Image: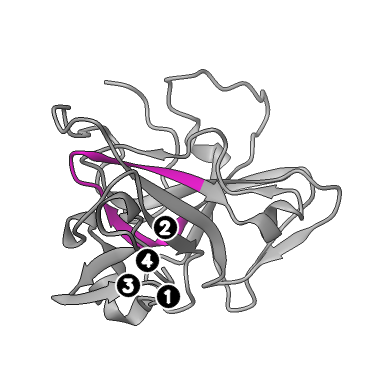
Amino acid sequence: MSWVVIDDSRKRGRNHCKWNGREASEPDRVPADKLATNEIRPPLLVGVNGLILLVEARFEPPTSRFRTVISVEPEGASEATYSHALPAAWIKKKRIEDAGIVLPGKSCLLGCSREVISMPLGYFGLLQTKGSLARLFVLINCCDGQVDAGYSGKITFEIINMANFDVRLLPNQRVAQLFIFKTSTRLVEPYKGRYQGAQEPTIQLPEG
């Protein structure tokens, strides 16, 4: 995460937030090292309306204990059934080296964010690929960019290289932006799904 911006212009006439008890206004930038353990907790912020928070998610850094990505490599009959577990032999975990990882053209893998996200009731997140990476025809999510209220954990990236050339992703690079929105009500059930608490990339898990 690199910085935080609050859009509270309808209330205060300027961007405004509170960070560790200190008020900050635009063009202040809240650096990542001010956020203990790289954890993002929107309740720390005050005075919110509409679009409230923008954070930049980074690819797992070299110092992470969870320096892995997951690729799905079919063997033999290559058919998967939605809501059923994938064959264990298809699932390949790969370590992210200091030089990064190469995503071949027309390929995909699962990675995850460096940051831990704790989404409170009354908010939801929407993940978008960084523009410069998108211009290399690489997508960070495959139509699963929402972060539900009540979710806590790292965000899995469904990374797809749509180009006809290889792209190298380096550890700790900014690859996505997470927009966090305030919702019209807090009266929703918190997320209690099977991906709760993820600390590394998660493969499709069967229902039930």
Which mark is nearer the camera, 1 or 4?
1
Residue 122 in the image: state x and y as whole percent.
20, 38
Residue 76 in the image: state x and y as whole percent.
68, 28
Residue 112 in the image: state x and y as whole percent.
45, 55
Please name the amino acid that badge 4 sits on: Val
Lower sequence index among marks 1 and 4: 4
Please name the amino acid that badge 3 sits on: Ser
Residues at marks 4 and 2 touching, judged by CB atoms closer than 8 Å: yes
- Would you call the spot at circle 3 few (<14 residues within 10 Å), some (14-19), or many (20 or more)? few
Q: Is residue 54 above or below residue 181?
A: below
Lower sequence index among marks 3 and 2: 3
Please name the amino acid that badge 1 sits on: Pro
Of residues 43 and 204, the one drawn nearer to the viewer in this rendering: 43
Q: Which residues are magenta?
A: 112-127
| Alpha carbon distance from label 1 to label 4 | 10 Å
Q: Which residue carries the number 4 mark?
A: 4
Q: Examine the rendering and report whether any part of residue 176 can be seen.
A: yes
Is residue 198 toward the left or the right of residue 155 in the image? left
Which numbered circle lies on residue 140? none
Q: Which residue carries the number 2 mark?
A: 54
Q: Which residue carries the number 3 mark?
A: 25
Is residue 111 toward the left or the right of residue 194 in the image? right
| Alpha carbon distance from label 1 to label 2 | 14 Å
Query: Measuring 25% from the left and 66% from the top, which residue is drawn there?
Result: 17
Q: Secondary structure at mark 1?
A: loop
| Alpha carbon distance from label 3 to label 1 | 6 Å
